[in-house]
Image (spheres, rainbow, N blue to C red):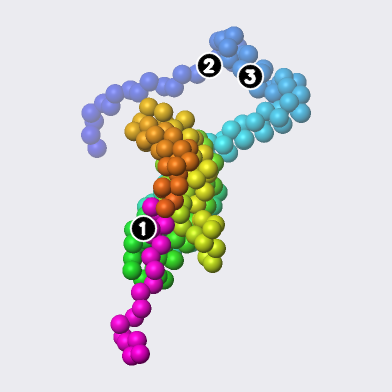
Amino acid sequence: MSTEQKPTLPSPAHHDPTEARPEPTALARWLSTAWDRFKSGQLLSYPVMALLLILIAGTAFGIWLYYERKGAASAKWAEWDALSSLSELNEYAENNSDTLQGRLARLEIARRQLGEDGIALLSSPDPATRQSAIANIEKAREAFSKLVDEFSDNSIAKVECLMACAKAEAILIGMPKEGQLEQFRGDPAKAIEWLDKLAQAAPDTPWGQDAQKLSETLKNQNTRQQVITLQASVYVMPSLPSLDNPSPRP
């Protein structure tokens, strides 16, 4: 065994029971007293304490709900961005009718009905294709007229919807209703109304300026009749006889 002397460790400090302890600070005394009074309901009445706890819980829930909705909104944007076919857009718009993404889906459907499935097919030599195109333009006109109000808080989308309404109405001028040659699908007065709204909504843009010019043109009765005649001659094509079955000889 080593005889080397180990260093003597200091013994733990002992407090003399008779020795006076340090006085707590004023802040420590206040916190201790306040907590005791809070627990016993003396600092705040129990109804006030309950209300306070409800407010704290409500604030925490609001923060949680905000981040949950933010995540859900991101998921909806990703889902909307993946839509491509008309059937997908229709299904999404139906299932999300009260959301911004649902309104944008209906906007895209109306665009296709007016453009590639409507105006682009009016010059087709096939009567069935032309009838389908006219029906799509009428659907687009109805959809855009509703979307004008739904996008009242979005000036860009609203202007686009106003322009589409005016375009659809103007295109249908001169197109007679089914079996009624004297009644047209488009109303010049309604087209003028949409054009005036567009001019008011976008007064300093080329869209608004062109709308104002076209509105003044349609207000002239002679010009209006010329437009109706032109539209009828361009888009209402007679059905040609088929060459597969030659007509009988006299």
Mark drawn on residue 32: 3
Q: Position of residue 210 (x, y in %)?
A: 37, 35
Q: Residue at x 24, y 30 (%)?
A: 3
Q: Position of residue 93 (x, y in %)?
A: 49, 56
Q: Is residue 26 visible?
A: yes
Label whose residue precedes the other's in the sequence (3 or 2) = 2
- Rendered image: mark on residue 100: none
- Distance from the alpha carbon under mark 1 to that under mark 2: 110 Å
Quadrant in which the N terminus appears = top left
Badge nearest the viewer, 1 or 2 = 1
Q: Callout 2: 10 Å neighbours few (<14), some, many (20+)?
A: few
Q: Nearer the viewer, residue 54 or 130?
A: 130
Instruction: List x then y, in percent, for residue 235.
Output: 38, 59
Vertical comparison of 88 with 8: above or below: below
Residue at left offset 58%, top offset 12%: 27
- State which region is magenta: 230-250
Name the residue type under label 1.
Answer: Val
Q: Secondary structure at mark 2?
A: loop
Residue beneath the point at 65% across and 22% down: 35
What whole-number distance in Å separates the C-alpha atoms at marks 3 and 2?
A: 24 Å
